[in-house]
Image (cartoon, rainbow, N blue to C red):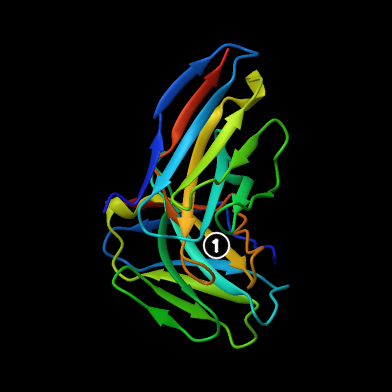
Amino acid sequence: DAKTTQPPSMDCAEGRAANLPCNHSTISGNEYVYWYRQIHSQGPQYIIHGLKNNETNEMASLIITEDRKSSTLILPHATLRDTAVYYCIVSGTGTASKLTFGTGTRLQVTL
Amino acid sequence: NAGVTQTPKFRVLKTGQSMTLLCAQDMNHEYMYWYRQDPGMGLRLIHYSVGEGTTAKGEVPDGYNVSRLKKQNFLLGLESAAPSQTSVYFCASRPGHPGPLHFGNGTRLTVT
């Protein structure tokens, strides 16, 4: 599975959009990009995933560049409850799709 | 639908003791995973299973064993606990690729 690079921390004002970048320059054609978040010490929560096209759900939007080497998770109107560690993961097909987590980006949403 | 349930939530062991952590899911998922998370770090994969009766090693399998005798359960065993195994353990399941992981709430284990 391809490795990912994320900034260790980011700040965002409440009500503004939070844009979290992820670099995955070694991604291969059949690998998906997944985003999870972890609030305090709870179990990680799934946010969104995609292969090539941009995706949107009730929580966030995922923008994947055309060459698929990077992506951005967008929380359109961040709230204090979005303060968490966000993990970007790349994982391929087949039974050995292990979903390896890195250290993520700690997003701090402030008033 | 309870999702992924981990038992116990907390446990304190002495060095050398053994224990089994239980993970149960009621979503009929094929794949199940055990991760550990140490303070300030991301999750590291211990073992995983892609179906009933199958298991495979992850990044940090040493000192742990697993079994998947029933599709809904994935057991993580520590035969002889060591202080280095003090951690928070998370279980997760997914229906298959590319489905998302669903996590339990974790087991906090302290080995003294």
Q: Residue at x 33, y 58 (%)?
A: A13
Q: How many numbered marks are there?
A: 1
Q: Is residue B96 above or below residue B59?
A: below
Q: Nearer the viewer, residue B2 or B82?
A: B2
| Coordinates of residue A39 in the picture (x, y in percent) | 38, 46
Q: Nearer the viewer, residue A99 or A18?
A: A99
Pointer 1 local density, CA inside 10 Å: few below 14, some 14–19, many at least 20: many
| Coordinates of residue B74 in the picture (x, y in percent) | 51, 44
Q: Say which residue label 1 marks.
A: A88
Q: Residue at x 57, y 74 (%)?
A: A32
Q: Is residue A46 above or below residue B40?
A: below
* For residue A24, side relative to residue B71 (left or right): right
| Coordinates of residue A101 in the picture (x, y in percent) | 59, 53
Name which quarter of the figure residue A31 lies in.
Answer: bottom right
Q: Amino acid at mark 1?
A: Cys
Q: Is residue A40 visible?
A: no
**Label 1 element class:** strand
Name which quarter of the figure residue B87 lies in.
Answer: top right
Q: Residue at x 55, y 33 (%)?
A: B39
> Chain letter of disc 1?
A
Q: Is residue B97 visible?
A: yes
Q: Is residue A46 above or below residue B110?
A: below
Q: Residue at x 64, y 66 (%)?
A: A95
* For residue A107, side relative to residue B14 (left or right): left
Q: Quadrant of the N terminus of chain A?
A: bottom right
| Coordinates of residue B18 in the picture (x, y in percent) | 59, 20
